[in-house]
Amino acid sequence: MSPDWTEKYRPQNLDGVVGNPQAVNDLRNWAAQWNRGVPKNKAVVLMGPPGIGKTTSAEALARDMGWGIVEMNASDQRTAEAIRTIALRGAYSDTFNDAGEFLSSADGGKKLIVLDEADSLFGNVDRGAVPAIVELIRETRQPVILIVNDFYALSRKSSAIKSETLQITFKRPIPASIVKALKKIVAAEGIEADTEALAAIAANSNGDMRAAGRDLESIAMGRTVITEADTEHLSNRIVQKSIYDLMYNVFRKNAPSAARKMMMDVDEDTDMVMLWVDEN
Ligand SMILES: Nc1ncnc2c1ncn2[C@@H]1O[C@H](COP(=O)(O)OP(=O)(O)O)[C@@H](O)[C@H]1O
Ligand SMILES: [Mg+2]
């Protein structure tokens, strides 16, 4: 099976990551510090909503730096044990292979350790995960990236995770940036698409580029031309849901900080959100 478009067109380098210039820049600067030794913050946390390029950026960074990569997905139940193993090895050795076996520094270069969806480790299966992560960020001699949707869920379990990491926030790319990315995809696929059609897909995605890519692919199936009419069946479910969540936070839970956080997740459409708040 050929990969879906979101995989096929996943940017391979940081230059290809759409939006988030500040975050990408911070990531590059942090990585550059590793060329001069072990930096003060050995771990960074990439935070932000799904589908906006966090995992992509971690992988692209490793490629740009010529580093190897060890990726652990935290939704995997074996992860806490794996973190422990890698944390311990990282403490004593300079590097290790993909199986977690350590190599002398002569044999291997740097390895970026990526703990993806790190917030999903908590609360459920393995309470040992938090100390394992803290140990990892303290003892590692390799660069570490933790990726989370909700940094609060992670940091309230451990103040060390907050104080001993560099935090980088990813925001939802604006619709215009998403349209640009979609244009590249249709061009590569030899499909003719109206800008209005792509704009409709982008607007409906609420900044989630994975969702936008998937919607585009499903609309393009069996077509060589896409017009705005082809996008009409796209619902506004995602937008409506996030607005509903925001309303809920503002009025029911009386939790302004949660509401503010949600607004911060939105790159530029804050005015639109404020309008909603006014009208409800
Ligand atoms: N900033 C971006 N620039 C270009 N493509 C993106 C971006 N964000 C997401 N994508 C697309 O969406 C897919 C999922 O992105 P990913 O990095 O896995 O999101 P996240 O880790 O933030 O949930 C990628 O394979 C890519 O096709
Ligand atoms: Mg991801």
Image (tube, helix red, strand yellow):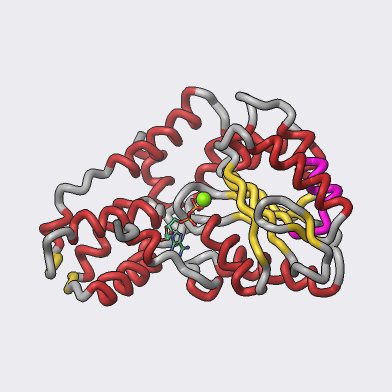
**Closer-to-camera residue (28/72):** 72
Residue situated in front as seen by the camera: 96 or 181: 96
Instruction: Please tell me which residue is depicted at 17% across the width and 55% down the height of the picture.
Output: 231
List x then y, in percent, for residue 155: 71, 38
Taking 126 as reference, is 194 above or below it? below
Q: Position of residue 187 (x, y in %)?
A: 26, 76
Residue 38 percent location from the top left of the image: 85, 64
Q: Quadrant of the N terminus?
A: bottom left
Residue 22: image x %, image y %? 61, 67
Apparent side of residue 269 relative to residue 103 in the rendered image (left or right): left
- Look at 56% across and 67% down and name the residue there: 60
Q: Name the quadrant containing residue 119.
A: top right
- Span highlighted in magenta in the image: 134-143
Q: Is residue 223 magenta?
A: no
Q: How many marks?
A: 0
Residue 155 appears left or right of 42? left
Q: Residue at x 45, y 28 (%)?
A: 248
In the rendered image, the residue lying farthest to the right is: 92
Which residue is at 43% across, 46% downward?
274
Prevalent SS, magenta region = helix
Q: Image quarter for residue 95? A: bottom right
Residue 261 or residue 94, whichever sits in front: 94
Can you tell which quarter of the image residue 66 is in? bottom right
In the visual, does 58 lie left or right of 39?
left
In the figure, is residue 9 to the left or right of 143? left
Q: Tell me the quadrant of the picture where the C terminus can be found.
A: top left
